Image: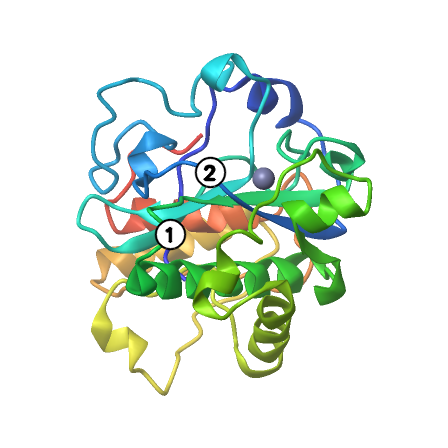
Amino acid sequence: MNLHVQLATKNECYIKNSGTKWTPKGIMVHSTGCNNPNLKRYVGPDDGLLGVNTNNNTWNNYRPGGQQICCHAFIGKLKDGSVATYQILPWTCKGWNNGGSSNSTHLAFEICEDGLTDKTYFNAVYKEAVELCVYLCKTFNISVKNIIDHSEGYKKGIASNHGDVAHWFPKFGKNMDTFRADVEAGLKGAVTQVQQPESTESKAAKYIVQAGAFNKKEYAEAMVEKLKKAGINAIIRINGDVDGDDKVTAADARSVLRKSVGLEADCA
Ligand SMILES: [Zn+2]
C-alpha cells in the first residue's frame, strides 16, 4: 500500500468531527461515479505528488459540490500515473460518506473511477483497496464480514441508494465476496506496515534493527530524529492499540515518517 496523508482540514466534516473519537466497526467501499482517476480532483492541496487542481474543487473545501460529504480516504492516480491511497480524515472520527446509519459504524473510502475499461488500472486500485482494508482491519480489529460496498449497505438499509462498486468490480471478474476473501488472505499472510519504507533497499531487507519502544510520541520522534541525523532511514511502527492523548496514532506515525524523509513540512 502506498499510503499518504493530506487531511481535508477545510471540509465541514473534518471541522466538526475530527476532534471526536469513535471505534469503527466496519468499512464501506465506494467508487466515485465519474470518469476521473486522478487523486488531485478530490485531494489537495498539491503535495508535489498529487499535481495541482486548477478547478479548486477538491474535498478540502467546506462543502464539496455544495454537499455535506467526506470520506476517510481516496484511492487513485498520482500525477506520475502510479496508484496511491490518500487519507483525508482521521480514521478515529466519523465520516459523512455513506448516507444513513452506517456513517456511525463504517469507515469509508472512495476509489476514483476511470472509464471502467482499463484492466491495469482496475487491478492496481483493487490491490491497493485490499491492502488498505487489511491495514484497517488490523488496526481497529474490524471483522472482514463487516467490509461491505455502498450497494450492499443500501440493501441492508444502512446507506443511501447507490450501486457502487457492483457496477465496476464484476467487469474484471471481481466482486465484494472475492474482495473480502482477498482481505482475509492478506490478514493471514501479511505483516502490514504503517508506511512502506522509502528505499527499495529496505523493501528487500530480511533483517530489521529495532532502535527502541516508547510510550510517548515525542520520545519516538526524538529517536527518529537522532537516527536521521546519523544517516539512518527510520520508521515508527505502531504496536497494538495506541488511541489516547499522548500516545502515537497511525496518522502521527505517518506524519513523523514523512517529515523525517522531507516529504512534509507540517501535517497538523
Ligand atoms: Zn458510494
Q: Amino acid at mark 1?
A: Leu
Q: Report the number of discs.
A: 2
> Could you classify mark 2 by the number of other residues whose Cα lies within 10 Å: few (under 14), some (14-19), or many (20 or more)?
some
x 30%, y 49%: residue: 260
Quadrant location, the N terminus: bottom left
Give whichever of 180, 70 is nearer the camera: 180
**What is the crowding at mark 1: few (fewer than 14 residues within 10 Å), some, or many (at least 20)?**
some
Q: CB at mark 2 closer than 8 A to ligand 1? A: yes
| Secondary structure state at the residue bearing disc 2 | loop
> Quadrant location of ligand 1?
top right
Quickly name the residue at label 1. Answer: 116
Determine which residue is flagged by label 2. Answer: 33
> Of the residues under marks 1 and 2, which one precedes in the sequence?
2
What's the CA distance linking mark 1 and mark 2? 10 Å
Query: Foreground residue, 195 or 102?
Result: 102
Instruction: Name the image quarter holding residue 22.
Output: top right
Q: Amino acid at mark 2?
A: Gly
Query: Residue 166 appears at what percent x and percent y?
Result: 58, 54
